[in-house]
Structures are given as structure tokens and as C-alpha cells.
Amino acid sequence: MASTASQIVAVTALNLSNLRQRVGSSIVALIGITGVVTVLIGVLSIAEGFRAVLDQSGAADVAIVLRGGATDEMGSGLTLEQTRLIADAPGVKRDANGAIASPELYVVVDVPLRTTGTAANVPLRGVSPNAGKLRDQFRIVEGRNFTPGKFEVIVGRGAVKQFKGLTVGSRLRWGTTEWVVTGLFADRGSVAESEMWTDATVLQGAYHRGSSYQSMRVRLDSADTMRSFKDALTADPRLNVKVFSEKQYYEEQSRTLTTLVRTLGTAIAVLMGLGAMFAALNTMYSAVSARTREIATLRALGFGAVPVVISVLAEALLLGLVGGVAGMLISYFAFNGMQASTMNFATFSQITFAFTVTPALLIQALIYALLLGLLGGLLPSLRAAKLPITTGLREL
Amino acid sequence: MKFLPLLWSNLQRKRLRTWLTLASIVVAFLLFGILQTMRAALTGGADLAGVDRLVTINKVSIIQPLPQSYLNRVRSVEGVRIAMSQDWFGGIFQDDRNQIAALTVDPKIFFEVYPEYSLPEAQRAEWQADRAGAIVGSAVAERFGWKAGDTIPLRSNIWTKSDGSSTWDLKIIGIYSTSNGDNSSLYFQYDYLNEARSFGRNNIGMIVMRIADPSRSADIARKVDEQFANSSTETKTSTEKAFVQGFANQMGSIGTIVTAVSSAVFFTMLLVIANTMGQSVRERTNELAVMKTLGFSSFQVTAMVLAEALLLTVLGAAIGLGVAAMAAMSLGQAIQQFFPTLGMPANTYIIGAVLAIGLGAIAGALPCAQAWQLKIVDALRKA
């Protein structure tokens, strides 16, 4: 047993030390594996980033109330009377100014994308003074908040990076009114950072919405009161509404896009993995055939088949490891934190997010790279072990 | 021709390597075919948009309506042949997840505005006569098992009826066919929606028009917008292509990035393959010298090396693209909820052929040059 171990060490060391002679074909396999890992991480980091935004957007103790039948804020509608009934429901948290609830409007306006200059549907949310209290981390990072009653907007940190002309002090013309950007706000990287906010009553006027709203956010006493709050609203004959927890609402919105991106990403990665595996197989087969004489000599000297197999596998795994790590580094520096925006199908509006390379993703990719190396080395190593010694020695 | 057996036996020399190389080529071109399909899908069929159609929307944003009176004013603009309004319905069937692209149109002129759509004559008449009639794409009909004559309750996530309900009963008149890949939409009468909806009555979502002379589209678009300039509801008119393209751009950089990264990898794969193939020729240098000694000309030897490389790449590309075309069909079905796709674009084959020949040429180039200049004595001494 000890001798097998020392044989393995000796043969593997010998094998790796003359790797330099096969550097050309090894680099070919390396490039293949690096490419696969880079693309795999790159694509999946889109899904991660998108999910991260929507995941952290939702609090479990905040409820979103929509009109019955609506699937998102855009298509919903609530009357002033309904919003008052909702604010009075049991389980709603209160402070000195009454219920912590914000009836809101959600519309989109055309703002050009920075990348292409073509118009994109950027969400414009009309909020009540309580909106900040419903989003724990909300803060103004530049300029000041909008003044209620004026045509002023504040812009999310994500939106200002993706869309043109939204910096503090910019003037925007929508319809017959001119709006001024008075500040930028941040909210822990949530979906709100893709939006612009203004005073709900001003927006009602500008969009001819009378006194109606579209959705209502309500802070509850605790996440546990969600059920009783929901039951109270659905039992009320004066209301025809749908209640979600904010968390659940955003989870449902992220599902479509993350599934789409993951499916496509995985399909591409598997395909490219096949390509890389063929390259690795080719490399390892030619490595074995180049060493035919050497291996036969070793066997003739009394080395066993196992150390030979392991030495070839070790070389293939090394290729996988180096390729995997290179891909991890490239993709991390190329993609992590990259800002992007896309259409959120659920609300028909833009959402901004950052590519997010998570540790789990890196490990997943590394495992994939090692697996490719292993598969690429397995068959060639078996061939090396089965090589008849006498013919091997006769080879050129 | 007589060299073919020789070519074949050269490829058989290291059968495993040949197979692996061929497999890599197949995979590379499969990836290429799928990338092309994805790119075509992500541009949202902008290439399929009618060149003679313009789209007018509210200047503030597409979700803001236009007054119905605008339709007639657009029709009166010189150069406009026909114009029709559309409203986005936001259709949902049974479960919230089953979203359907449902739009209201005018059945009397729908097929004139969109000549690429067709429906049997009898069904056309029936559709015009039936207020609650709807026509659907084949994919959506198949998905939910709808057939002509069925009445389906379609819910809207936007519109409610005056009685507070948001479910609209529609009668399936027939299944349209179209050449633009849109097989998952549903179209029904504007009047049906407009009369029953509880708000937004006598508004329209957007106007689609056909113009007589596509070369004047910019001019006509400007004239349309001038009609409504400085009113409380200004408009933005663009060609259908620009409209669709703008919509596709909203998908954002995701598609671009994925395509860019994958293309980079595709080209790397090609280089890798070229290297492997080149190597297999280099190993045979002294064999080429023997052939030259036997009287083969430099040209013949070079041509044979090149032919061997091309045989492999073209064969691999053909298989790869063939598989990609099939994969594109199933991929198309998986994502047609988001983008209409026509499968793999036809020009993929042409680009693929060029790439395959280019790949073969690159793979063969260096060994070819060597084979051409090969001095017999030097080469024979190499072994």
C-alpha cells in the first residue's frame, strides 16, 4: 500500500515535471475550460443579480394591496375610499400620525436608455409621505426630497446610472408639465432604486387620475398578522382586493426572468462544456500517446497500473483546476457589480440591477471545471493503463 | 476524386482524434446556431416588422392612452392609407401565470393593416359579425386546448367591467396563421372592450397605420405628430421597426452581453480546433515528403492537406447547424411566451458555411504552407 502511494507520487511528479513538453495542446484545453467557466458564471450572475434585487425588495411585515384581478401595481386601481378602509383594517401598525400606510400610483414614463438612446419604460411612483417609513433603508443620497404639491421628482440610484438626463437639477418634460429632479435616493439596492418618485397627489393631477390610487403599502404589527389582515380585507364586502406580502409579491415577479436566464445559461454552459470536454479529451489522448514509451518503460520497471492512471487523471484535473480558477478570476473581475437594466415583464417597466458573482456560483463553476477535467482524463488514463508493455516499448 | 480514399484513410489514421475533432466542430456550430437564434429572438422580430407601417403612441409613455378622436385625425393625414387602433388587454387565462398577449383591434380592417396575417374568408366574416369574437395564434390555442367555437373566460389584469368583474367572455372564431412568427397572441374587437369597461372609455392605446410610400415614413410620422403638437396629449410616431427595436432594447444589455461572451468563446473554440487539426498534419511532415518523392506535385500535396481540413469542418458544421435548427425549434417553444421566434434565421447557414470554410482554411494554412515549401531531403531527415 505504501509502495503504491509512493509510486503514485513519483509518477505524478514525473508526469507534471515534463508537462512543459506538451504545453501547446494543454493550453488548448485550458482555454476551452476557462471559456466555459467564464460564460457559465457570467450568465448565471445575471440571474443572481436580478433575484438579489427582488429578494431584498420585499419585507415580510409589509403588505401590498391591489385590486382583485390585478397581477401587478401597473394594472391595479383603488379608490380613495378603499384606501381609507384598508388603512383602518386590523393589524395595521400605527404611529403618532395614524396608520403607517402609503397609497401609491405606479405609471411609466419614456426616458432614453444611456446605452442605446432609445426610450425605455421607467417607473414613476407617486407616493404618500409615509413611503419612507415603509422602506427601512430609504435615504436621500444627493440633493433633497421632493416638495409635496410641486412637480418635483427624486430618482433612484440605479435609474440614474441606466437612463439619460436624470441627474439632480435636470428638467424633464412629460405631457404638458415640466418636472425637476431634486434628489437621488438609495434603498439598500432594492427595486425602488430603479424608480422615480414624486408626490402621489401631484401625479394624480398630471395623469388625470382624479383621487384614485393604484396600490397600497401597509406596515403590519408583525409578519404574523398578515393572515388576519388579509382575511379582514377579503371579508369586507366594500372591497374587492388582493393582498400579498411584499416579499411574496417580488418573489413572483422575479420568477419568470430568473427561470428564463437560468435555463438559457445552463443550456449554453452544458453545450460549451461538451466542446471543452472534447478539447480536453484530445489533449489527454495525445499526452498519453506522446508518453507511450515512457509509460511502457515505467511499467517494465515494475510500476503498477494504478499510479499510471492516477498520474494522467492528476494532469487532467490540474488542467480543470487552472482553467476553472482562471475563468473564476476573469468572470469575477469582468462581471461582478456590472450595472445593467432590463424589462421586468411582470410590470412592463424597467428594473436596474448589478451582475452578482456569488461565492456559491464560483464554487459551482469550479466543480464543473474539475468535472470536465476528470471526464477528459478518465478514458485516456485507462488507455494508458491498458497499454501492452512490449508494443509500447517498440513505439517511436 | 481518386484522392478521396487517400483523404479518408488519412482521417482514419487516428480515428479517435478525428472523431473528437469532428465532435468539437459539431458542438461549436451547434452553439453558433443557437446564438444566432437567440440574437434573432432578442431583437424581437424587428426584422419582421412591416416597412410600410407606423406606430403612434402617447409621447409620455406607451401606457398613457390617446383620445379615440385621434384615429380619424391620423386617417386624414396625407400619405396614410389605413389606420387602426389597438389596446393592450393584459389577458390572463385561469392562473395568474398564464399571461396572454391579448390586443383589441378592428376586425374590418385588421387584415389590411397586417397583410401577413390570414384567416379563412368565412371566419373573417364571422369575426366581424360577432362582437365577442376572438382569433388566436396556434401556439396559444394548443397550449390551452382551444378550438373554434369555444367560449373562454379571459381575465384582464387592467380592465374591469362596469359591474366590477374583470372576466370577459370571448368566443374563439378561428386560428390565424401568420408569417411573422407571432403564434401566441389573441385579437378581439375594440368595441367589445370599449363599451363594457368601467374606465378609460373612448380612449385608445395606440394607432397602427400603413402608409403608401415607405420612403416617406419619416415625413409622415412628423406630420402625424404635428397634428397633436402643443395639445394636452402629444404623440410620438415611429416606424414599426423602430418601435419594435426600441422595445427590444428595453430588454437591455443582457442579450448583448451573453451574445458577446459566447461569440468570443465560439471563436476561441474555432482556434482550438484549428490548432488540433493543424497539429495532426504537422505530425505527418515526412509522409508528405515521401509523397513528393513519389512524384506528387507541391500543388497536389497542398490541395490534399487543405481538402482534408475542409472535409472535417464542413461536415462538422453541417451536422452542428442541423442539430441547432432542431434545437431552435424547441427553444422557440420554450420562450415564445416572451419573444416570437421563427427558429434559426436562414442566413445562419450562409454565415456558418463561410465560417466552416474559413476554419478549414486557417486549420490547413500553416501545414499547407509548409507542405508547399517542403524540401524533400529536409523533411525526410526530420524523422
Image: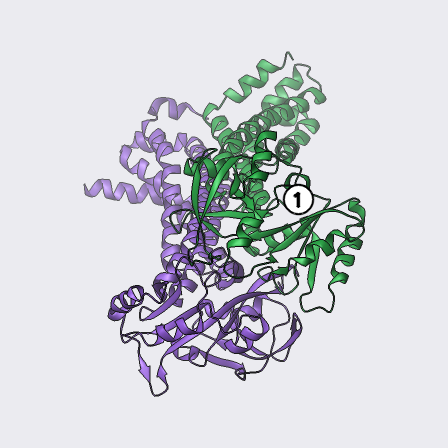
Chain colours: A purple, B green
> Residue A261's x, y, as percent?
46, 50
- The structure residue drawn at horizontal position 71% and vertical position 54%, both measured from the top left corner, is B72
| B287 lies above or below B62 | above
| A242 lies above or below B293 | below
Q: Nearer the viewer, residue A185 or A92?
A: A92
Residue at the far top: name it. Answer: B2
Residue under numbered circle 1? B49
Query: Can residue A60 be seen in the rendering of this structure?
Result: yes
Circle count = 1
Crowd class of label 1 (few under 14; some 14 to 19; many from 20; radius 10 Å):
some
| A195 lies above or below A368 | below
Mark 1 belongs to which amino acid?
Answer: Ala
Query: Can residue A278 be seen in the rendering of this structure?
Result: no
| B167 lies above or below A298 | below
Quarter holding the N terminus of chain A is top left
Label 1: state its secondary structure: loop
Q: Nearer the viewer, residue B66 or B115?
A: B66
